[in-house]
Amino acid sequence: MTRPIWRARWLALLLAATCAPAAAQELYAMAGGQYTPSLKEHSTSYSFEYAHNLSDYFYASFTWLNEGHVTDHHRDGYSPQIWLRWPSSSRRFLLSAGVGPYRYYDTTYASETGSVTDAHGWGVLYSAAAQWYFRAPWVLQLRYNYAQTRASIKTDTLLIGVGYQFEGSTAAGPVPPSHYDLSTPRWEVTAMAGKSVAGQLGLVREFLGHHADVGIAGGFYLARDQDYQVPSNTVVGVATNTQVLGLLTMTMTWRVTRMFHLRAYWYRTLTTNGRDTDVLLAGLGLSF
């Protein structure tokens, strides 16, 4: 039996990020249903979307999508997308179409052998959406996704949810990019209890008068993995492996004072051996 060890052992500097305002202006939380045509099965689905207006007719987004549970599959993934949209004359109602690469992580179950693996790969995420800017800063979104992959299942998801605009505007609809209030970039160091050391660069978008922000970060971390094996002679053997892996992070912050802040992290480790892991952490940080 093998398993990675994640318990805290020593204090590490886990993040040193440039916190410049990022290309994101709206944040959405959505939930709905998923259908897998090859299995003829339905499941629940939910997602988070982080979007930025490029113009009245184009915007970019970063989406995390959970596709629920169907037979032998439990899949989620990330997708950066470029969107084309068509606003109504009032700018309160918009139709959009987007496409982008889809990096998926699929926990699969082999019924023949009874083994569980984390299969991951690349696909394409095609999306269509309708947004209703019914009351600033709130937005209602109805979204359809088609996830196309070669080595895994293809799925259809239909979601509905609410979004929040980070910047206010006197006009209805999406806030034009020229109206963004860009603050001065700064450095942050956050101390966390952990077992591995990571260095990341992050981009965030502030709101609520610079008291809060959301963002994404990416980088590399040094991982120490201990594999426990029990041979037939009952003597326990331990194999230790240290390697550099990838790390993708979504983060949220609340600033207690100008200097100190509370930050929450959602880490997704990026491996080559199917041991991708989700890690949720929170800590106290220093801004300067």
Image (tube, rainbow, N blue to C red):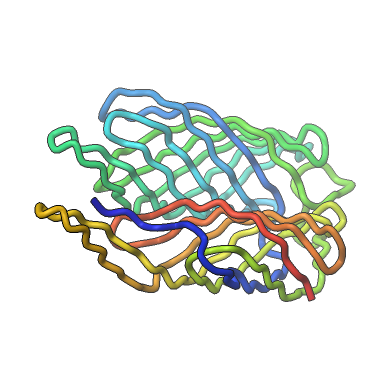
**On the picture, is 57 further left or further right than 108?**
right
**On the picture, is 55 further left or further right than 245?**
right
- Rendering coords of residue 171 (x, y %): 85, 45
Picture residue at 32% right of the left edge, 38% below the top? 154
Foreground pick, 277 / 19: 277
Q: Which quadrant holds residue 193?
A: bottom right
- Rendering coords of residue 230 (x, y %): 19, 54
192 relative to 242, above or below? above
Q: Residue furthest left?
A: 232
Q: Which quadrant holds residue 137?
A: top right
**Residue 225 visible, this orientation:** yes
Number of numbered discs: 0
192 relative to 140, above or below? below
- Rendering coords of residue 91 (x, y %): 76, 40
Picture residue at 82% right of the left edge, 39% below the top? 136
- Rendering coords of residue 97 (x, y %): 53, 44
Q: Quadrant of the C terminus?
A: bottom right
